[in-house]
Amino acid sequence: MRIVAATLLSLCAVALTACMEPTEPLARAEARWSQCTPCHGADGHGLLNQAAPPIAGLPVWYLEGQLTKYRTGLRGSHFDDGPGLRMKPMAQTLPTEDDVKNMAAFVAAMPAPPHSDATISGYGPNAASTFGLCVACHGADGGGNPAMNAPPIAGQADWYVYEQLRKFKAGIRGGNPKDITGGQMRAIALGLGNDAALHDLARYVADLPVKRPH
């Protein structure tokens, strides 16, 4: 109930202030960024206590794609996805596709964060070989590949990587038949083994040097 109330208050605030927003594209996005900071932090480095990942410096094409998925309901509609259910209405406050593009460009231009503090103690000897399943799309260095719609994952927060792997495997993310790229990732996640294997892979990915190509 608190989540719903907070979301409604945020939406009302957006509606009341929309007429005062600047008209220049990136300045407009910067003005809207204040809506994102309670969860993602002023620097975009994410807040674990809000289950909001680091997003600063991610590629503009990926940010735009995910905002569009939230905005259209391809992501953030599953009843077991609490963070996604919070994110979906926030993305829907971006009224046009141009606003989505502008916000993506603004966030992509922010300095990428350093490695997040570890929340998973370590990984087992099979983590590197498990990561081999990720290489075809995300690259040997985890730097991502826009041609495969695969974002950079190297250096991403371990808790977030784990949660996304868990959600893909459970169909909480990527379960919508219209989410083609999410469905592809879900198919990979289904072959990743048990929960311990997900933890190992998440920690392994988080330890890779941060990559943020655009």
Image: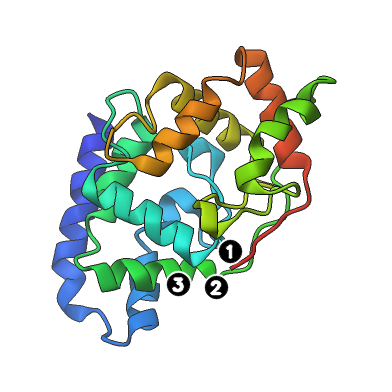
Mark 2 neighbour class, 10 Å CA radius: few under 14, some 14 to 19, many 20 or more: some
What is the secondary structure assignment of the residue under circle 2?
loop
Report the residue at 54% width, 59% height from top: 146
Which image quarter holds the N terminus? Answer: top left
Name the outermost residue toward the right. Answer: 125
Q: Nearer the viewer, residue 66 or 21?
A: 66
Q: Which mark is residue 57?
A: 1
Crowding around mark 1 (Cα neighbors within 10 Å: few <14, some 14 to 19, many 20+) is many
State the image coordinates of residue 214 (x, y, percent, origin top left).
58, 68
State whether residue 102 is above or below residue 72: below
Q: Is residue 55 visible?
A: no
Cα–Cα span, label 2 and label 3 = 6 Å
Amino acid type, callout 2: Ala
Residue of label 2:
109
The residue shown at (39%, 32%) is: 173
Q: Looking at the picture, how far across and down is residue 129, in whole percent?
A: 78, 27
Above or below, comparing residue 138 to residue 83 in the picture: below
Q: Residue type at mark 1?
A: Gly
Farthest-out residue, bottom:
24
The three-letter code of the residue at mark 3 reads Ala
Which mark, residue 105?
3
- Residue 204, picture quadrant: top right
Question: Marks 3 and 2: in contact by CB < 8 Å?
Answer: yes
Secondary element type, mark 3 = helix
Tell which circle, 3 or 1, labels the residue nearer the N-terminal end. Answer: 1
User: Which of the pair 191/100 is nearer the observer?
Assistant: 191
Q: CA distance from mark 2 to mark 1?
A: 6 Å
Disc 3 to disc 1, how far (Cα)?
Answer: 9 Å
> Can you give x and y, in whole percent of width and height, for residue 30 in the image?
40, 74
